[in-house]
Amino acid sequence: MSEIILNQVTKNYGKVQGISEISINVDPGLTGILGPNGAGKSTMMKMILGLARPSMGVVTVMGKDPFTDWEQRNKIGFVPEFDCFYEHMSGLDYVSYFLRMHNYEKQEAEKMARASLSELGLEDSMERKIRTYSKGMRQKTKVARATVFDPEILIMDEPFQGTDPSTRHLLMNKMKEWSEKGKTIMISSHILHDVENLTDRIILINNGRMLASGDRHEIRKLMDHIPRQVKVSPIDKTNLRILAKRMLDEEWVRAARVDEEQGEILLETDRAETFYLELPKILQKEKIAVTKINSDDDSLDSLYDKIVGGSQWK
């Protein structure tokens, strides 16, 4: 059974709809929730955390309703998007304080907090006031607070926002490590490259609706009808116009444009599977050798850009 299940979940805020009829199953391991700001990612996470109740549909976490089962919250770690610190505290005091709220004794809480903060590279600064921390140090402290009690589920809302490369690298490695231990980790982000480096299990949402889910290859199948562009570079540049004219004879090629300066043809298709199957046959038959066949669609950025539109990003 999946650790997190949303079944036809809708959340309304008065006349404003946060998410609409979303159904997902999240299994142990890393899952990325991708979408532009305002897409509904945080609303989804609030319901998983039991901080909001769905207007319609059902949310279950480890088989129980997170809104009514308070014991579940002791098994879930949460890294919020926005800072929520007591600035006068040190990182050590802050993490220890939340452990005390989980009924740990003071001495044990401090020991666990020291270990967690050290694991995240804050061993030399954990006793400084949080108000002196950099953005990266603050993110590490939030992650330490969320993971110090070894939760079964970890929900992370924009965990890499504003972090420097070294902090991002450290957090990624820790997430992979926790995932390999069987924990269920859900990461919300609009930084596609970061999530692509972490996991191939992705859910794309926009305007409160789920657009696609699965790995990149499954999503590509779902969007096979969406036009995409492929660049073909013949070795012999005199073949540019010959090949472009030949490709326009095929019904699965919507357009062809010759770029003499770059020495390539830009082809547009809305039947990608047919395109990639038939193009090699045509090149062989016409005896046209090429140096490169390139499409941007292998990147997660391009997939999302095709489905949602790059103008949606903030």
Image (cartoon, rainbow, N blue to C red):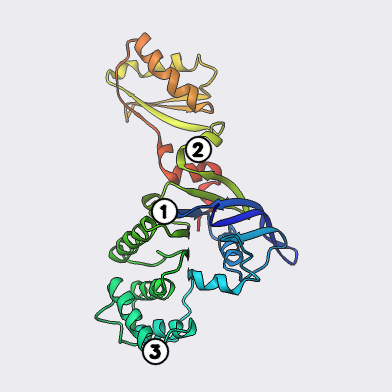
Does any portion of residue 86 appear in the rendered image? yes
**Do the CB atoms of the residues marked 2 and 1 lie less than 8 Å apart?**
no
Classify 14 as above or below 100: above
208, 51: nearer the viewer: 51
Give the image quarter of residue 168: bottom left
Q: Residue sitting at 68 percent across and 58 percent down? A: 58
Q: Name the residue under label 3.
A: 106
- In space, the residues marked 3 and 2 are separated at their CA atoms by 49 Å
Q: Which amino acid does label 3 sit on?
A: Lys
303, 187: nearer the viewer: 187
Give the image quarter of residue 172: bottom left
- In space, the residues marked 2 and 1 are separated at their CA atoms by 17 Å
Q: Is residue 164 left or right of residue 48?
A: left
Q: What residue type is labelled 1?
A: Val
Q: Residue sitting at 59 percent across and 67 percent down? A: 46
Q: In this view, does 231 lie to the left or right of 289?
A: right
- In space, the residues marked 3 and 1 are separated at their CA atoms by 37 Å
Q: Name the residue under label 2.
A: 218
**Do the CB atoms of the residues marked 3 and 2 lie less than 8 Å apart?**
no
Q: Residue sitting at 43 percent across and 84 percent down? A: 104
Q: Name the residue under label 1.
A: 195
Q: How crowded is mark 1: few (under 14 residues within 10 Å), some or many (20 or more)?
A: many
Classify 22 as above or below 166: above
Q: Residue furthest right?
A: 15
